[in-house]
Amino acid sequence: MARMPSAERRRQLTEAAIRAMARDGVAKTTTRSIVAEAGLSLSVFHYCFDSKQALVEAVITTLTDQSVSVVQEALRPRDTLEETVAAGFRAYWDHVRAHPETHMLTYELTQYALREPGFEHLARRQYELYGEAYAELIEQLRGAMDLELRVPVSVLARYLAAMTDGLTLNYLVLGDAAAWEDILDTVTTHIAGLVR
Amino acid sequence: MARMPSAERRRQLTEAAIRAMARDGVAKTTTRSIVAEAGLSLSVFHYCFDSKQALVEAVITTLTDQSVSVVQEALRPRDTLEETVAAGFRAYWDHVRAHPETHMLTYELTQYALREPGFEHLARRQYELYGEAYAELIEQLRGAMDLELRVPVSVLARYLAAMTDGLTLNYLVLGDAAAWEDILDTVTTHIAGLVR
DNA sequence: AAGGGTCCGGGACAGTTGACCTGATACCTG
DNA sequence: CAGGTATCAGGTCAACTGTCCCGGACCCTT
C-alpha cells in the first residue's frame, strides 16, 4: 500500500466511510467494512482516528458542508422571482433524485448525532446552516429585486428549509417522482405570493 | 412473575420496547434492555417473539397506527376552514411538544425499516397512511363546506403530510418553539388560499 | 549509511449481542 | 387429583465489534 500522510489518509477513510454508510446504512457500517471499502488494513484506521466516533464526526461535518453547498448551488438568483424559486427547486430536486442514498444518509446521521452524547451540536449545526443558506439567498433576492416580504426572513427561511426537508424524506420513502412536480408547483406559487 | 397469555405478553414487550427505544434510541436498544424495561427474563422474549426483528415489526406497526390516530384526532372538522386547519395544527403541535421522544422514534424506525431488507413496506405504509388520513379529512371538509380546491386532493394531502413531517423534524433538531407558531400561521393562510 | 519518526500489516482480546436449550413451575382439562 | 400443556428462569454459545499491541517497512534527515 502506497504511503501517504495521515491527513490525506483521514480524508480517504472519510470518503470510504461515506460510501459504505450510504450503501449499508449507518448501523451496519463497522470499522472493518470501512477499511475494506478503502482497501486498507484495520490498524490504519486507529492510526488515523482515535476512535470510530472521531471518524463519524468527520463524516458528519464533511457531509453537512456538502449538503449546504448543494442548497447554495441550487438557489442562485435568476431574472424573476418565480423563475428563481422554480429553478432552485428543480436543481435541488435533480440532486435528490440523482443521489438518494446520500440524502438518506444525511437523515440517518442527523439522528445518530441527536442520540450520541456530545454530538447534538452537529445535528443543530446542520439545520442552522440550512436555514442560514436560505436566509442569505432571500436577503440577496430582496436587495436585487426590491421585494417586500409579507413574513419575516427568518420565518420564510425556516419554512423553506423544513418543507424541502419534509418533501425529500417523503420522496425517499414513497419514491413517487410525479407527485413532487405538482407539489413544488404549488409551493412555488405560494412563495411568490408571499412577496410583493 | 404473574402468568399471562402470550398475546398479552407480546403487547407488554412491545410497549416496553417502545419506551426503551424512545429513551435510548433504536440502535442502543437490545433484547436485554427491553426485557429489563418490562421486568422480565430474557427467555420470555424468544418465547413470545421468533426474533428481535419480529418485535421491531410489531413496534413499527403499533407506533404507525398510533401516529395516524394522532393526526386523525387532531384534524377534526370545525366551523370554518381556517379554524379547522389552525386547530388541527395546534393539536398536532401540542402532541409533538408533549412527546418529542416518540416522534423522534418514529423517524428512527422509518429509516430502520428502509434499511432492513423485507421491512421497506412498513416505512411506505406509514407514509401512505399519513397521506390517506389527510386526504380523507380534505374530502370530508370539501363535502361539508362546499369547497372548491385549486389543487387535486392527493397533491394537497401529500403536501400537508410532507410539510408537517419536515416541520416536526426541524423542531426536534432545533427545538425553537416560537418559530413554529409563525410558520404555522403562514401555512394556515396558504392552505386557506388554496380553496374557494 | 544510520537512525529516528512516520506509516502499515496481522493478530489478539474483552465486551456485547442475538439466539438457544434444558429444566422447573403454574394452570387447565378430564 | 393426575397428566399435559403453556409459561417462565438461568445458563450457555457463537458471532461480531471496537480497540489495542507489536513487529516490520518506508522515508527523510544528518
Image (spheres, coloured by chain):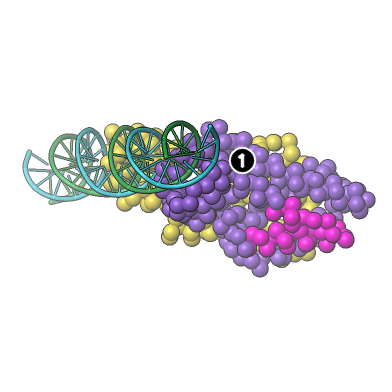
Chain colours: A purple, B yellow, C green, D cyan
**Residue A79 lies within the magenta run:** yes
Residue A24 % position (x, y)? 47, 55
Q: Is residue A163 above or below residue B42?
A: below
Few, some or many C-alpha atoms within 10 Å of disc 1 (few <14, some 14-19, many ≥20)? many
- The residue that label 1 is drawn on is A123
Q: Which residues are magenta?
A: A70-97
Q: Tell me what residue is drawn at x 80 percent, y 46 percent.
A: A136
Q: A58 or B158: nearer the eye?
A: A58
- Mark 1 belongs to which amino acid? Ala
Report the side of A106 relative to A24 (left or right). Answer: right
Q: Is residue A107 above or below residue A122?
A: below
Report the side of B63 relative to A65 (left or right). Answer: left
Residue B63 % position (x, y)? 50, 47
Of all residues shown, which one is farthest toward the bottom? A178
Residue A105 % position (x, y)? 56, 51
Chain letter of disc 1 in the image: A
**Residue A46 lies within the magenta run:** no
Q: B153 or A52: nearer the eye?
A: A52
Residue B108 % position (x, y)? 52, 47
Q: Tell me what residue is drawn at x 79 percent, y 45 percent.
A: A135
- Quarter of image, res C17: top left
Q: Secondary structure at mark 1?
A: helix
Report the side of B55 relative to B63 (left or right). Answer: left
Q: Is residue B79 above or below residue C24?
A: below
Q: A135 or B11: nearer the eye?
A: A135
**Res. A39 visible in picture:** yes
Q: Tell me what residue is drawn at x 66 percent, y 68 percent.
A: A178
